Image (spheres, rainbow, N blue to C red):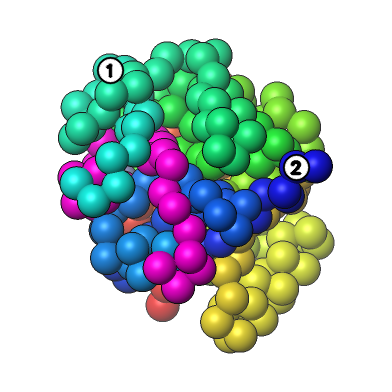
Amino acid sequence: MNTPLLISPVRAFSDNYIWVIHNQRYAAVIDPGDAGPVHDFLIQNNLTLCGILITHHHADHTGGITELVRTCHVPVFGPATENIPRMDHPLTEAETVHLAPLQLTLQVIEVPGHTLGHIAYFGHGWLFSGDTLFGCGCGRLFEGTPAQMLTSLEKLCQLPAGTQVFCAHEYTLDNIAFALTVEPDNPVLRTRSQQDHERIANHQPTLPSSLGLEMATNPFLRCNEPTVRQYVQHLAGNNINHPVEIFSHLRQMKNHFHLS
Ligand code: ZN
Ligand code: FE
């Protein structure tokens, strides 16, 4: 019988999550920006590392690879078009990652926007979305265009609504505050706001969320909704109609949004 797989968050820096998939014997890590907290978690839980999965090249996602590989000699998977330290398994669209010790199989989804090579991993009902899709938000456009990012987000929305979403940062409350300025009367968003404030007050992660919840509350996935379109048009002009333009303005508004 297969041992069920568990997922645990390991916190790093101020707001990163390094997700650890394990079966109480072996473990794989996603985006280990820092080796220290990963090592501590492995030791505390008596786990042997068997693989490292990377979503994109930013240091807060890759900074721990070299140290982990030095001590654990495990394969490093990541986006083929990005420069990832120690990567020996470059991945492209629709390829799969299989880690036999975990009986884990994840499918690669290319999601350019935050960076040009950014990939997400999907399988077992889970989505590891890196810095592409956040709880109630999305990543900044450091390398890609708004059209690329919107296409990437729409691609993720094709996955089953029950998919659990594991993001690489705890940004949910800030994102909810912005979302509430866009859709103050969205009842699902208001309920989510309450729940996630409680989670943070109890020192719990707001993640995973689900794709269904994201589609009901995340303004960046709702560029076709009249409420979201009207909000953007009200601030930026009635001539703005195309979903890419709506998305682009929304992303810029979020960049300049600060809690008062
Ligand atoms: Zn990043
Ligand atoms: Fe990041």
User: 220 and 79: which one is in front?
Assistant: 79
Where is residue 247? Give x, y as percent.
50, 34
Q: What stretch of residues is rendered in magenta?
A: 43-69
In this rendering, would 174 be left or right of 66? right
Question: Farthest bottom residue?
Answer: 201
Query: Magenta stretch containing residue 68, yes or no?
Result: yes
* Residue bearing the label numbered 2: 2
Say if 192 sits above or below 26 in the image.
below
Q: Residue, x 20% and y 32% (percent of image)? A: 86
Q: Is residue 42 above or below residue 129?
A: below
Q: Which residue is mark 1?
A: 81
Identify the residue shown where x is 77% and y is 32%: 160
In this image, 234 relative to 62: left or right?
right
How far, Cα to Cα, is label 2 from label 1?
34 Å
Judged from the image, the secondary structure of the residue bearing numbered disc 2 is loop
Crowd tier of the residue under label 2, counting other residues whose Cα lies within 10 Å: few below 14, some 14–19, many 20 or above: few
Task: State left or right for residue 61 relative to residue 46.
Answer: left
Q: Earlier in the sequence, mark 2 or mark 1?
A: 2
Q: Is residue 252 above or below residue 239?
A: below
The image quadrant that residue 162 belongs to is top right
The percent coordinates of residue 212 (x first, y second) are: 76, 44
Which secondary structure lies at badge 1?
loop
> Is residue 177 in view?
no
Where in the figure is residue 222, as x and y percent of width and height?
65, 38
Q: Viewer-nearest of labels 2 and 1?
A: 2
Q: Position of residue 126 (x, y in %)?
A: 66, 41
